[in-house]
Amino acid sequence: MAIVESVAAEGSGRRRLRLRNPATLEPIDEIEVQTATDVRAAVEQARKTQPEWAGLKVAERGRILARAIPELLARQEEFLDVIVRETGKPRAEALAVELLAACDAIQFYTKRAPKMLADRTVPMHLLKTKKLRISYRPLGVVGIITPWNFPFMLALSPTIQALMAGNAVVLKPSEVTPFSALLIQDLLRSARIPDGLFQVVLGDGETGAALVEAGVNKISFTGSVRTGRKVGEACGRNLIPFTLELGGKDPMIVCADADLERAANGAVYGAFSNAGQVCVSTERVYVVEEVADAFTRKVIEKTAALRQGANGEFDVGPMIWPTQLETVERHVEDARARGAAVHTGGRRNPDFPGLFYEPTVLTGVTQDMMVMREETFGPVLPILRVRDEEEALRLANDSRYGLNANVWTRDRRKGERLAKAVQSGSVVVNDCMLTYGATESPFGGVKESGIGQVNGEIGLRSYCHAQSIIIDRFGAKSEVLWYPYSAKKLAWLQRVLRWVWGTPLGRLLS
Ligand code: NAD
């Protein structure tokens, strides 16, 4: 059954969508799909408010936005109810990865942005008569488009960064999980930000496409490669900057000297948390022959002990989006048909009405199977035995994706060496997934996993234009390079050229 269904339009004539809980399939509520005209109006309203906000000191913006934290703490149960209702994820997971991470992001940026965005003076290596200042200017109105897997955190974190940088924000959340985004609207209203500075426009792909065309000054997109490509093309046509945080096929490399107990626990958490619907889920394991049997045995045992559920204490929730569940089934069926062994799961869970797929461990897979090449984005962990670390590395890099990866070894130096050899936006050694939640860390993929980076100082500054201001220090009446040109000036320039780049002292000083 679809969890997002079109229903008849009402008085306004706008399309309407009815949403269901993916765990129970019970109806949640309906939303009205906002049109291109609605989106343009939101962007215009945001543009009117933005200069006043940009005029505040960064620390003052921080003081206002930080008021969201006590509000979030006070209303955490209500927020969890909404997030759990539209995603079905375990409450503990929603608390840890949505609310706790959100508090950390608000605190981190509101506290540190004043320093990260402060004007700075850059020493001039050659033009000693000038002073260079870099000033981080806001871009204007930022459009943020987000997916359904972490509907609160993935919308809140870029919003806080863009706002701290002095921008206004129009957010278009996934049509599958719109109500978590409305919580952010509520939260920021309670922090008493100026009216119109942050707005949510609801709807599906049409509303998202309208936002890209609505005259915004940047798009921050998180979602699939297929949609990201369209968004990138539209941004290119409109000549606006964009970041694309897209899909992944994260490899895990298990070396012979790994702590197998920790690695197996990490594999199970990395593959099955949020039912595998994490952009940095562990999606394929390469384990060296010597430890493959022991490691695989532990992973199967630990996976078999996971509890699925919709209420109370459980570990793994449902898939959130039926289309994704079909992708999971296709990948597992392809692997099974081509000789893979299914040790756990391998089917929908018949005990629940909702979109549950049982945590699945596969062995006997080959690199050319769908489950090893395409993003599964579900609770499936294929394990492939390799001869040695070099083979693991070669297969890990044999992918069109490059979002995140994890490497397991007791030798930290080797871990770092292998990490640098993985073609991936980020790598974790002896842990998994962490990168997005490690707020200082820039996050973003290489290859088809994305363009640009979010988070940390780099991400925060990407919501600004680094304006260079060069100031003459001494006020001479003219400059040596200005008119008139003469044979004497030419000879002088040649002497400069020879001395600065042609002598050891010149090279030392330049
Ligand atoms: P999706 O690409 O289908 O949708 C993402 C958002 O784009 C939604 O809000 C959707 O309504 C909107 N959209 C759809 N068509 C559009 C268009 N033509 N123009 C503008 N917006 C449009 O992705 P999804 O299914 O919601 O999310 C799952 C995907 O997101 C997975 O591939 C996952 O790996 C990826 N993801 C990446 C990260 C990351 O940080 N790299 C994080 C989470 C999820």
Image: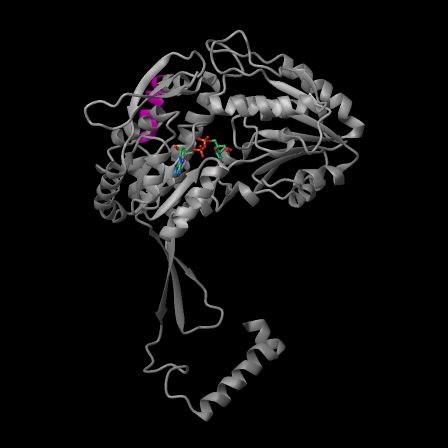
Q: Main secondary structure of the magenta part?
A: helix
Q: Is residue 182 visible?
A: yes
Tell me the quadrant of the picture where the N terminus can be found: top left
Q: Residue at x 37, y 55 (%)?
A: 119
Tell me where residue 465 sits by quadrant: bottom left
Q: Nearer the viewer, residue 96 or 272?
A: 272
The C terminus appears in which quarter of the rendering? bottom right
Q: How many marks?
A: 0
Residue 218 at what x, y percent from top left? 36, 47
Residue beneath the point at 44% across and 29% down: 101
Colour style of the rendered protein structure: one colour
Q: Residue 108 location, x and y as percent?
A: 42, 37
Q: Quadrant of residue 298?
A: top right
Ligand 1 resides in the quarter of the picture at top left
Residue 308, above or below 271: above
The residue range painted magenta reads 68-78
